Amino acid sequence: MHHTCDPALRSFVDVAPDSPFPIQNLPFGIFRPADGGDARVGTAIGDKVLDLGALEEEGFFQGPHLRGRKVFRRDALNELMALGRPAWVEARERISELLRSDHAELRDNVPLRGRVLLHHKDVRMQLPARIGDYTDFYSSREHATNVGIMFRGKENALMPNWLHLPVAYHGRASSVVVSGTPLHRPCGQTLPAEADAPVYGPSRLVDIELEMGFLVGGPATELGQRVPVEKAEQHIFGMVLVNDWSARDIQKWEYQPLGPFLAKNFGTSISPWVITLEALEPFRCEGPAQDEVQPLPYLRSSGARTWDIELEVGLKAARMAEYHTICRSNFRHLYWNVSQQLAHHTVTGCNIHPGDMMASGTISGPEKSSYGSLLELTWRGSEPIALPDGQERKFLQDGDSIVIQGFCRKGDHRIGFGEVEGTILPAI
Amino acid sequence: MHHTCDPALRSFVDVAPDSPFPIQNLPFGIFRPADGGDARVGTAIGDKVLDLGALEEEGFFQGPHLRGRKVFRRDALNELMALGRPAWVEARERISELLRSDHAELRDNVPLRGRVLLHHKDVRMQLPARIGDYTDFYSSREHATNVGIMFRGKENALMPNWLHLPVAYHGRASSVVVSGTPLHRPCGQTLPAEADAPVYGPSRLVDIELEMGFLVGGPATELGQRVPVEKAEQHIFGMVLVNDWSARDIQKWEYQPLGPFLAKNFGTSISPWVITLEALEPFRCEGPAQDEVQPLPYLRSSGARTWDIELEVGLKAARMAEYHTICRSNFRHLYWNVSQQLAHHTVTGCNIHPGDMMASGTISGPEKSSYGSLLELTWRGSEPIALPDGQERKFLQDGDSIVIQGFCRKGDHRIGFGEVEGTILPAI
């Protein structure tokens, strides 16, 4: 059998050269046919969606880990996630086989192809998982440093704990939404500059955060069970793009001493397709050196424990025709990798469930053009971004749309995350 | 029909005078028969548990809101919670009727009684709900002030935002456990005094937090929908006792700038019986005056928006025979009431689901004997608690058990929450 990442593999389904979804990708997502019908699991191939729920019902998954399981006719990936990596690999290999140009089984079954291969425009994507708990890390040194300089000055930019542990906080799971869900500008309490009492009203400093997140897979762990750093990837199903919308003025007033709360819980947008670690394998790389402060043994990881994922953020004001790129960054900039994040999260014995999401925190790179939030890009609003039509932006205006895209490339081999998009509607 | 809170109501089931569960209480919980069988919903009456799942199957719930619903043969209260208050009241009134001494239907049906009334010792209680999101407030002025004095001095004890909004943070839902679940002492990273680098190991400062929590009920709200303060109680199903175990040394090192994370996620214990707002109605009272700083209109509430609930914390070291009371407090001390908490939580449009839990934060009263954490009771360990057998406690030792009890009383009328109990096992 060919390796499912082999750049030479081709599908009988046409895939444009710039498509995020060649046969080497095979992400998992949840879709509903636009003309009705239940939600089910699919994979993306070019501009098509392959209905894995229908294939499962017709008996196409008979390997040892999937036979008799009902994991694809579901409205969330949690049941597939719970089965663990051997089942994910089995599914991937079988789907790869079914889509290959040199494999006749699906290729030559025209009626079946008609039923199970839908145009992307004929489906509606949903949230890929029931997210039990959502954790947000703060793992970009550049981001933490930038924010630190703005709020505490250059000397104390990084908190004393930052190089010793992956700082994180628990987020709100209920308000995680799928790409394309518009969000109303949140209302809340803020303390205007010079004011001696807070006021209520729409946030004036709505921001984005360019993040990625991983979704936990494998059987739920028991309370008290630690996930060692070297085994952490066994508990990771795949990754998505994340826009962690943030109301900076609400955050500034509320966050002492227990951290961000309402500033973040009005919505967190994620991309619909979960890219598996199998698909990301060819793009593994090492993260930043951690020799300035050596992590404690439970956090020490070696080798290529992260991935080279190019990231772009586009902004489109209501009257603009196209997105304007405001940031180019890369997942590999993150100081703390996902294995370290998961090892840290569970070091107290905190239990994890399939479908839990752990996001990276804002992914800022070293150059200004790679900063992952408007807060940093405009340096707290002091250096507005010029848009092509002459407008300026310090923070988001009503009607502004944001799109985050992510992709990996190596020569001709390119796989993508697709995008996470969202628009800020007026406050209600 | 008698009012279900009428102190004159009596059940044909014997109820001891000091039982937390007279017929006026009728809490909801999830149990599993100790000798096997599926989990289902029950209510507590004296030292018995009434199997509501069995009664539902036999057609005992035929009112307009419950007829045809299957909400009691479930392993969580979420389906009942989602129906909303009219259904909860209908269930309560019907259960009250069935248990009344002057109502023959169940009283005189001996075979049925044998099937549906179980001894509490013959059942195992489970978590009452699938908790989607868990939020922890910080609503006791006395607690926030005590902690503030210890960490920042008397002048800056309360943060500037504290009297303006109910400070809160998102907690970890996966590690909420039911009373009786032992917890291992968590391991993690701490910075010992005088040390210049953190160390890894078992927490040495494991603490308790005396809290209560409410469980959200009613249909899920939409993202963008605010719950107004005056309608907030419509979205509250009932209340439980909460012990928010805390590792103070881990917390101190990790919590800047994003708040508590691992210090709290190794376990949060709750009592198994959810006491409804209907049962609490006779014990309504006003909370502390909020005239020093008037809340913004969206947070302004008037009238008796809280409840007089007496709370006690007992500690039992491994070799002690009985619990020693270390704290007596009262829910009414809380500065911010549950309606204000929920209105604040949703002011940004954050959506809520039935089964979400929102805890109060540590409930400390004005006197030292009413402080709800060891941190405050021992003033950071500087004034150890003397136990009856001559031992001292600054923080919890391995083998220490903690029990929190809560009850309301007014003359002879007394209803209780039962208890939440937990033991700290050695680190693993």
Image (cartoon, coloured by chain):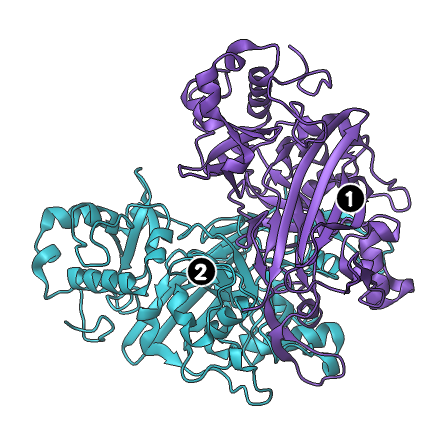
Chain colours: A cyan, B purple
Q: Is residue A81 above or below residue B306?
A: below
The picture places residue B351, in percent across and down from the top left corner, at: 57, 43
The circle drawn on residue B5 is: none
Q: Badge 2: few (under 14), some or many (20 or more) residues near its Cα, within 10 Å?
A: some
The picture places residue A46, in percent across and down from the top left corner, at: 26, 61
Q: Badge 1: few (under 14), some or many (20 or more) residues near its Cα, within 10 Å?
A: many
- Is B201 or A155 nearer to us in this picture? B201
Horizontal arrangement in the rendering, residue A99 relative to residue A283 (left or right): left
Horizontal arrangement in the rendering, residue A120 relative to residue B119 (left or right): left
Tell me whether the residue at label 2 lies in contact with that at label 1, contact meaning CB atoms closer than 8 angstroms.
Answer: no
In which quarter of the view is residue A155 placed? bottom right
In which quarter of the view is residue A294 placed? bottom right
Viewer-nearest of discs 2 and 1:
2
Q: Label 2 belongs to which residue? A: A221
Identify the residue at horizontal 31%, vertical 46% (top origin).
Answer: A40
Identify the residue at horizontal 72%, vertical 54% (top origin).
Answer: B315
The amino acid type, in three-letter code, at marker 1 is Trp
- Is B315 or B78 nearer to us in this picture? B315
Q: Is residue A252 above or below residue B249?
A: above
Q: Mark 1 lies on which chain?
A: B
The picture places residue A240, in percent across and down from the top left corner, at: 42, 62
Query: Is residue A38 visible from the viewing direction of this image?
Result: yes
The circle drawn on residue B336 is: 1
Horizontal arrangement in the rendering, residue B380 relative to residue B68 (left or right): right
Mark 2 vs mark 1: tell me if same chain: no
The picture places residue A383, in percent across and down from the top left corner, at: 67, 72
* Secondary structure under the numbered disc 2 in the rendered image: loop
Q: In this view, does A10 lie above or below B146?
A: below
* Secondary structure under the numbered disc 1 in the rendered image: loop
- Is A263 or A401 nearer to us in this picture? A263
Query: Is residue A197 visible from the viewing direction of this image?
Result: no
